[in-house]
Each structure stands twice: as C-alpha cells, then as structure tokens.
Image: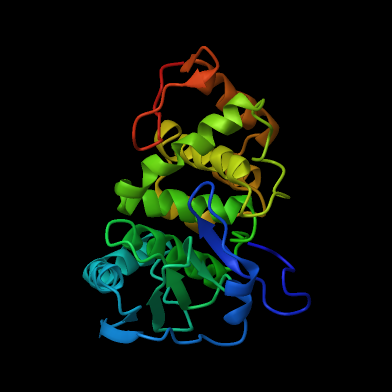
C-alpha cells in the first residue's frame, strides 16, 4: 500500500474504507516509530495484543471491542495459515481517528493503527493481522498488491461480516468497468479498490464455487491469484478467469451483479 511513498524508507500498508484516504503527513509521522496521541492510554492486553485508546469515548469503545475479538481472530488466522505463529509478536494496536480504516508500515509490521469505531475496528484490525501472516508464510501473498490485499479483505469479512457490505460497491465497480483481469495481472496496488473488488470475488469463487477451503488457499499462495488457482486446480489460469466471468454472467442484471450483503455470490448455478 502506497509503495514507495516515503522514498527508500518503509512503505505504508493501508486497508481503507472506500472513498477514504489517509493524509501523507499522518503516515509520515509514524514512519519510524509510533507517536503517541495527546490523550492516548493503554486500554488492555491479551496474549498477542496490546491495545491503546486515543482517549476519546469512541477510542475507548473501539479498543475494548478489539480486545474482545483479537485472540479469537488470531487463532482463526493461525488455522488458515497452517498453525503459523508470526515472528514479531505482540501486536501493538492503536485506536486512531485518522486511520481511515487500518494501516501498518510494512506487511510484517505489528504496530497497527485502526479507526476509532467500535463496530468496524475489529474487522479492520483482522485484515492487518492476516497481512502479517501473509508476510510470515512468504509464499507469494503480497499485501501491497491485489492478491494479498484481497485475501486479507475476504478473511476479515469472513470473521467480521459487519464490514463486508461497505466493500460490495468495489465489486460492482470492477464489473461495471469492464471486468479487467486482475487475477493474472497482480500489478495493481492495494489502494486500487476496483482491482481488490475483482480479487475478492475470485477468492470467493475459489472458496465457495470450487470448494477449496481457506487453509488450502492460504497455504498454496502464489505471486498472482491465477498462480494460486493453477496450483490448486492444475488448470490454465487464463481459462480459470474465463470460467469465473462466465459464472458471474449468470448473476448479471442490467450490468450489475446480484450480490448478497456479504459480497459473496457463490455458489451459482452454471
């Protein structure tokens, strides 16, 4: 996310709400180390997480919500990634009204800033936790590009469906804009919401239409989503993308996809 934003230094990895941007000066302030907010205070800790509030009522509530869900989410990620334990624990998590969603400075970074929203914060934190697992397994998932960004999104949606609906429009926008192949082209960055909308749908296709479970998908990896498809199925990923489009054509209604609130329309009858 924002690859090269700070020259030769660290590149921030950002999971943003659609239509939201984090000012460069906010990210730049945390390039080397976390800078404490004026009223920041430790809200609590668990085995793998130390969580801080920004000192506001929303920050306090967001911190408590994250503390309540973080360990169960961590255990789910461990299961998906074959029992892996990331090497840079614990996570230091900061409720931050300027986060725009959530961000950390590298894919492996365990200092995470999350929006001060008690309903949404646990899901956004989950996405960044998944990105740390992606970095640690080191099998092709790259949180700075479509494949890794989309995996972190859909796994966060799996655990926290309350944040999924906000991203349905990214799937619709990808479809309406001509449904470019971001499955075999992984060059789009992680702030490209249209590319991520494609990636989300393709991962749902792998999981719910082709019935590969999340541990199989996560452990397979690949430098593109198409490479993951090839390893899982043994088939040409170009044909896989065409089959994916054919499946989505069955739920096209006037140029829009018929999507449930979860954003996952699969399985469909073909």
User: Which residue occupies the foreground of this view, 184 or 63?
Assistant: 63
User: Which residue occupies the foreground of this view, 257 or 166?
Assistant: 166
Q: Would you place residue 259 above or below residue 21 in this image?
A: above
* Residue positioned 52% across, 30% down in the render: 172
Residue 109: x, y in percent?
53, 77
Considering every residue shown, the one lying at the far right of the view is 7
* Residue positioned 31% across, 52% down in the render: 160
Report the side of 106 relative to 74 (left or right).
right
Quadrant of the drawing holding the N terminus: bottom right
Considering every residue shown, the one lying at the far top of the view is 254
Report the side of 204 relative to 224 (left or right).
left
Q: Is residue 106 visible?
A: no
Residue 21: x, y in percent?
57, 57
Q: Quadrant of residue 38?
A: bottom left
Q: Is residue 208 visible?
A: yes
Q: Quadrant of residue 31?
A: bottom right
Report the side of 77 relative to 109 (left or right).
left
User: Which residue occupies the foreground of this view, 209 or 93?
Assistant: 93
Residue 5: x, y in percent?
72, 68
* Residue positioned 41% across, 72% down in the render: 96
* Residue positioned 45% across, 72% down in the render: 113
Q: Would you place residue 26 above or below residue 1 in this image?
A: below
């Amino acid at each position: 996310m924002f690859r090269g934003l700070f020259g030769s230094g660290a590149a921030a990895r950002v999971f943003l709400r659609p239509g939201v941007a984090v000012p460069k000066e906010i990210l730049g302030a945390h390039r080397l180390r976390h800078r404490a907010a004026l009223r920041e205070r430790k809200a609590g800790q668990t085995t793998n997480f130390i969580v801080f509030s920004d000192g506001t009522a929303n920050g306090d509530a967001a911190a408590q919500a994250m503390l309540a869900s973080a360990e169960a989410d961590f255990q789910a990620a461990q299961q998906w990634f074959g029992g892996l334990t990331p090497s840079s624990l614990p996570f230091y998590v900061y409720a931050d009204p300027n986060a725009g969603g959530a961000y950390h400075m590298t894919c492996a970074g365990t200092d995470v800033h999350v929006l001060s929203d008690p309903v949404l914060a646990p899901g956004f934190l989950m996405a960044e936790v998944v990105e740390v697992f992606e970095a640690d397994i080191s099998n092709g998932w790259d949180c700075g590009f479509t494949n890794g960004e989309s995996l972190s999104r859909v796994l966060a949606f799996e655990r926290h469906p309350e944040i999924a609906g906000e991203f349905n429009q990214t799937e619709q926008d990808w479809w309406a804009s001509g449904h470019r192949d971001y499955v075999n082209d992984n060059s789009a960055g992680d702030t490209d919401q249209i590319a991520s909308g494609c990636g989300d749908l393709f991962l749902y296709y792998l999981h719910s239409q082709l019935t590969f479970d999340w541990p199989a998908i996560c452990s397979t990896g690949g430098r593109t989503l198409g490479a993951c498809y090839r390893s899982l199925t043994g088939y040409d990923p170009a044909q896989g993308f065409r089959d994916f489009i054919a499946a989505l054509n069955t739920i096209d209604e006037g140029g829009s996809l018929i999507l449930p609130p979860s954003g996952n329309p699969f399985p469909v009858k073909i």
